[in-house]
Amino acid sequence: MREILGRRRKLLFRRGGRSAQLGAALHYATEWQWPVLPGVGLRSAGRQPAGARLGLVERVTRRCSCPDPDCVVPGAHPFDPGLLAATTDARMVRWWWTNRPDAPVVLATGDRAPCAVSLPAVAGARALAALDHFGVRLGPVVATPTRWSLLVSPYGLPELGELLHSQDWVPSSLRFHGEGGYVVLPPSQIGSGRVRWERPPAVTPAAPWLPKVATIVDALVTASTSTPDGGSRLAY
């Protein structure tokens, strides 16, 4: 079933010879009314030996295209244009990804757009297993090799503050992407690897259903707290 859904999504995002990123960005922006913009992306950083002692072939390394040589989220953030440029306008989306067809697709979270909660991949897998066990309905889940992001309906700071205040402790590895935040969406390529759907949205014109943050936050806090080396290092 997952393979069938994957093929359907590839067809959807590649219609008319468009790049996968352009097709996805147009669908998010025009069909679902999710404001998007291109991420900074990656650049080649030269070649490094894959195994100097064994004389193996060199491999190309990739770094963030932003000016920070030590960027901890390579390719996975806005830069130029900035986050405030996020839009649902099809003309702007086409212009951006026609000029940069491989740019990551960034969702500007908050306001009327989805919000998200992200946590390390190992903790994310544990949290999803616990939520499934208790029959909690989930929305789309975005996965990178290092972090998973659960998309939720829009929430405000007062609501989030009350939820977190009720917790004994909230690990720093758990991050909340609300107003003024962002999440990188599939089928982007970033420094840590490919961005994919761990729980894919239905391929329909209607925007995906999203749960409230209150229904999942307890499970995410528990999973993050109980995971050894909870992944507090900022990395995507």
Image (cartoon, rainbow, N blue to C red):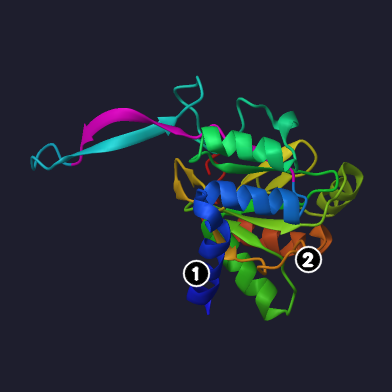
Looking at the image, which residue is at 16% across and 41% down?
A: 51
Give residue 139's position: percent from left, percent from top. 71, 65
| Corner quadrant of residue 76 | top right
**For residue 169, above or below residue 179:** below
Q: Mark 1: few, some, or many residues within 10 Å (few <14, many ≥20)? A: few
Of pointers 1 and 2, the one earlier in the residue sequence: 1
Q: Label 2, secondary structure: give it.
A: loop
The magenta segment: 35-50
Residue located beneath label 2 in the image:
209
Q: Position of residue 197 (x, y in %)?
A: 57, 61
Q: Is residue 117 visible?
A: no
Q: How many marks?
A: 2
Depth check, mark 1 against mark 2: the one in front is 1
Q: What SS does tag 1 mark?
A: helix
Kind of residue at disc 1? Arg
Is residue 135 in view?
A: yes
Q: Is residue 197 above or below residue 165?
A: below
Magenta run includes residue 46:
yes
Judge from the rendering whether residue 209 lies leftward or rightward of residue 78; answer left or right. right
Nearer to me, 156 or 225? 156
Residue found 69% across the figure and 38% down from its top: 91
Q: Which SS type dominates the magenta stretch?
A: strand
Residue 94, compared with residue 151, is above or below; it is above
Q: Residue at x 50, y 35 (%)?
A: 41
Frontmost residue, 158 versus 227: 158
Residue 187 position within the rendered picture, expressed as x and y whole percent measured from the top left:
53, 52
Indicate the position of residue 225 as horizontal and vertical percent values.
63, 56
Residue at 44% from the left image edge and 22% from the top image edge? 69
Q: Amino acid at mark 2?
A: Trp
**Which quadrant of the structure image shows residue 200?**
bottom right
Residue named by callout 1 = 7
